[in-house]
Image (tube, rainbow, N blue to C red):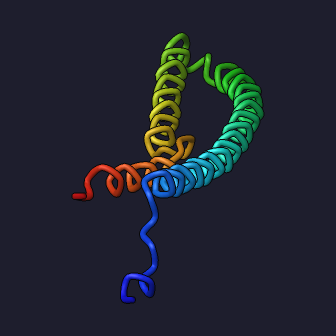
Amino acid sequence: MNNLEEEPRPGLIASLRALLGNALGLITTRLALAALELADARDALLRLLLLSACGLLAAGFAAVFWSALLVYLSWDFMGWRILLILAFAYSLLAWWLLHRAFIILSQGQLGLPATIAELRRDREVLFDRAP
């Protein structure tokens, strides 16, 4: 009579079906998270590109006009050396701007950090757990 009171254990097919259902749910959740992060990364990239293009255009016009004014005003005193100073200053500015851009890229703002972290945790749970 004790055997009738106990719940029957699920069979192999039922266990596999439950495992596949859980795996499918996990994959669906991770894909949804990846899609959201990709949309955020795309929006950030578009904003970055638009702001960079407008900033570069404005900075280019400003640099040309300020440089022309500086060369005009100091040509009598410095001659060709003013062109050398301006070339050095613009080279230094270009290096600094590229350095800042590489810092932004290295911070991973365009990547998928939350999705990668979740997938890493899933892998640890699925493969590092002893049966």
Q: Decide which of 3, 67 is in the foreground and name it.
A: 3
Q: Decide which of 35, 84 is in the foreground and name it.
A: 35
Residue 48: x, y in percent? 68, 39
Q: Residue at x 26, y 53 (%)?
A: 128
Q: Is residue 40 above or below residue 130?
A: above
Residue 22: x, y in percent? 53, 56
Q: Is residue 112 above or below residue 1?
A: above
Image quarter where the N terminus lies is bottom left
Which residue is farthest top? Answer: 80
Q: Residue at x 56, y 20 (%)?
A: 77
Q: Decide which of 99, 42 is in the foreground and name it.
A: 42
Image quarter where the C terminus lies is bottom left
Q: Decide which of 65, 76 is in the foreground and name it.
A: 65
Q: Residue at x 76, y 35 (%)?
A: 50
Q: Is residue 76 toward the left or the right of residue 102 in the image?
A: right
Counting the numbered discs, the total is 0
Tell me which corner region of the image, top left, top right, bottom left or bottom right, holds residue 79. top right
Tell me which corner region of the image, top left, top right, bottom left or bottom right, holds residue 90. top right
Residue 87: x, y in percent? 52, 18
Which residue is farthest left? Answer: 130
Tell me which corner region of the image, top left, top right, bottom left or bottom right, holds residue 29. bottom right
Q: Is residue 68 toward the left or the right of residue 120 in the image?
A: right
Residue 94: x, y in percent? 52, 27
Q: Is residue 114 visible?
A: no
Which residue is farthest front? Answer: 1
Q: Residue at x 49, y 23 (%)?
A: 91
Q: Is residue 9 toward the left or the right of residue 21 in the image?
A: left
Q: Is residue 87 visible?
A: yes
